[in-house]
Image (cartoon, rainbow, N blue to C red):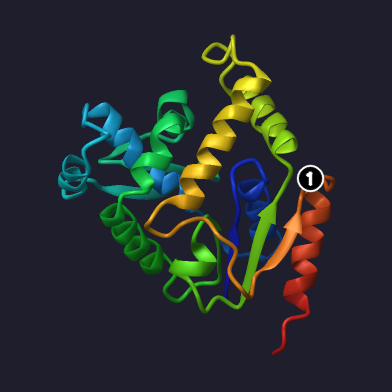
Amino acid sequence: MIITIDGPIGTGKSTIAKEIAEAIGYIFFDTGAMYRSLTYGVCKNKINSDNPEEIVKYLQDFSFDIKIKDETKHYYVNDEDVTDDIRGKEVTSLVSKIAAVKEVREQMVEIQREFAVGVNAIFEGRDMGTVVFPNAELKIFLTGRVEVRAQRRFDELKAKFPKENKNLTLETVIENINHRDHLDSTREASPLRQAEDAVVIDTSDLNIEEVVFRILELRDNLPT
């Protein structure tokens, strides 16, 4: 079975998907990490992010892998562990632009579908239920008020990268989220949108456990 969880930044997709996967013994895939890993490679190799042709050329040498280390997923780009680096400010500021390149999304979709062969898995992202797995048995679309999502993102960045975000303000995070929402939802290739058969859950006033319980309930009530 494939379960997809889509939605904008700050809705708790990754945390919720992880908890569900652990609860039912499914494999969890954070597809955003794939795009972040590619963006990290673009930054490291000083590729012009405004030049799609250069990005597509880099794709030919891009190697992505997932390995389990100390019971935790680690992401590798050309054998380099980039698990922490892909969450940094530079990657975050560019990932939507890189992910909007048509050829990038086409290659990532192929990789994601390869990971799904013969497994029970939860795929979290922005176009999982609409483009990558249109026939998924259960599709979830998470939403949330911008102010709430921004506060979550602000707290996460402050906790994980305190030095890098010493001067970060909540207002800046709100601006960044609004900008990224616009980019993700208006891009030509695989825009962020709700699948027609997705179940929408607003996470603004729900905690992680409540959302997880709701999704598990939906899964348990699927027709057999």
| Residue 51 picture location, percent across and down | 21, 38
- Side of 139 relative to 37 (left or right): right
* Whether residue 192 is visible: yes
| Residue 15 picture location, percent across and down | 66, 46
Instruction: Look at mark 1 in the image and give the residue it sits on.
Output: 204
Q: Nearer the viewer, residue 158 or 20?
A: 158
Name the image quarter holding residue 153: top right
**Badge 1 amino acid:** Ser
Name the image quarter holding residue 210: bottom right
Task: Write the residue at 46% across / 51% down.
Answer: 186
Callout 1: SS: loop
Q: Nearer the viewer, residue 161 or 141?
A: 141
Task: Write the residue at 68% across / 55% down.
Answer: 142
Q: Return the residue found at the far bottom.
A: 224
| Residue 22 picture location, percent across and down | 66, 57
Task: Look at the picture and state if 172 lies above or below 8.
Answer: above
Badge count = 1
- Side of 110 relative to 192 (left or right): left
* Whether residue 70 is visible: no
